[in-house]
């Protein structure tokens, strides 16, 4: 059981983070009927299935990366082929759940699956292709689940909501760059040409700073337009708090101390539309 938890990356507080990512698009439409619940479940399942696929694809990298050997050990314990089969089955189930709702929901989940496949697997493997990796993850983990759940909940075109979704996605890309820095040595040894490996730490940190500022401005603007200044301040403060942990030197410390701060921001963003309209 512990090996399954590891390859799905469901250790606390990661499960809370994934649940919020899966549902917060529906939170901004403030509607939760059966169809919306099915889409949220599909979002959640495809996200954790992508973690399983990533564990399979990165098993050699993780064996030489401090803080990730536990995941690689779990893959080897279960068996690499079984891990791949599990990821495929879970993605198919997620697609089926979305298809039971509508072709639009199925299209959203299908596009997420496509991005996760190209991110992880050869010959494309966008994870090792500079900025393509964090951009794809930002879109797959944040933007597409948000739009898919928002549409399923009957959300209408709204400039403020699009600013929020775009801002959080931009913020996620910046956060991904911050947190890739501790993995630089392991990625270099494994042949993954991440931005930190290709351009160096200083360049990556500068780019992460710019994206983070842009993301917070977009997020704050969207929240201000939709819910007012007070909620915008709350959302920006909660979402930017992870910067306090940005210099943690290892992946293990990032996950232990930095990630819970980011999860609090995710929970706050999911709660704001529900609290503001209550």
Image (tube, rainbow, N blue to C red):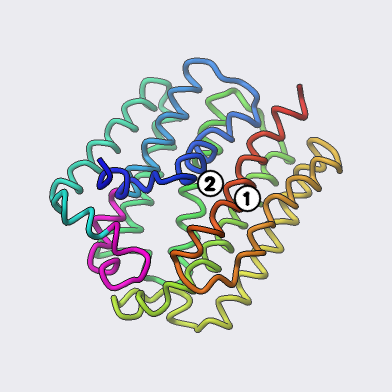
Magenta-drawn segment:
52-71
Q: Position of residue 137 (x, y in %)?
A: 46, 55
- SS at circle 1: helix
Label 1 crowd (10 A; few <14 / some 14-19 / many >=20): many
Is 226 situated left or right of 155 in this image? right
Q: Position of residue 142 (x, y in %)?
A: 53, 46
Callout 1 touching callout 2 (CB < 8 Å): yes
- Disc 2 target residue: 142
Q: What residue do we see at 29% from left, 75% from top?
A: 190
From mark 1 to mark 2, how far is it between C-alphas? 7 Å
Residue 20's disc number: none
Label 2 crowd (10 A; few <14 / some 14-19 / many >=20): many
| Above or below 20: residue 200 | below
Q: What residue do we see at 29% from left, 66% from top?
A: 62
- Disc 1 target residue: 168
Q: Position of residue 228 (x, y in %)?
A: 85, 38
Q: How many marks?
A: 2
Residue 232's quadrant in the figure?
top right
Q: Position of residue 236 (x, y in %)?
A: 74, 51
Residue 75 or residue 217, whichever sits in front:
75
């Amino acid at each position: 059981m512990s090996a399954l938890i590891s390859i799905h990356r469901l250790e606390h507080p990661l499960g809370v983070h994934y649940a919020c990512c899966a549902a917060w698009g529906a939170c901004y439409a403030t509607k939760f009927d059966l169809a919306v619940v099915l889409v949220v479940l599909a979002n959640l399942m495809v996200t954790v299935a992508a973690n399983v696929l990533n564990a399979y694809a990165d098993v050699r990298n993780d064996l030489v990366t401090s803080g990730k050997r536990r995941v690689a050990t779990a893959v080897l314990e279960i068996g690499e082929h079984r891990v791949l089969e599990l990821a495929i089955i879970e993605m198919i189930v997620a697609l089926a759940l979305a298809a039971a709702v509508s072709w639009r929901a199925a299209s959203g989940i299908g596009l997420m699956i496509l991005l996760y496949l190209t991110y992880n697997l050869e010959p494309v493997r966008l994870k090792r292709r500079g900025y393509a990796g964090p951009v794809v993850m930002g879109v797959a983990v944040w933007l597409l689940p948000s739009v898919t759940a928002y549409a399923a909940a009957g959300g209408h075109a709204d400039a403020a909501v699009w600013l929020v979704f775009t801002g959080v996605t931009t913020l996620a890309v910046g956060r991904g760059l911050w947190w890739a820095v501790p993995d630089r040595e392991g990625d270099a040894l494994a042949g993954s040409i991440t931005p930190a490996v290709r351009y160096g730490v200083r360049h990556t940190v500068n780019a992460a700073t710019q994206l983070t500022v842009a993301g917070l401005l977009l997020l704050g603007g969207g929240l201000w337009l939709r819910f007012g200044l007070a909620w915008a301040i709350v959302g920006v403060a909660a979402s930017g708090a992870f910067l306090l942990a940005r210099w943690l030197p290892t992946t293990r410390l990032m996950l232990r101390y930095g990630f819970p701060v980011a999860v609090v921001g995710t929970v706050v963003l999911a709660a704001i539309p529900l609290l503001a309209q209550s």
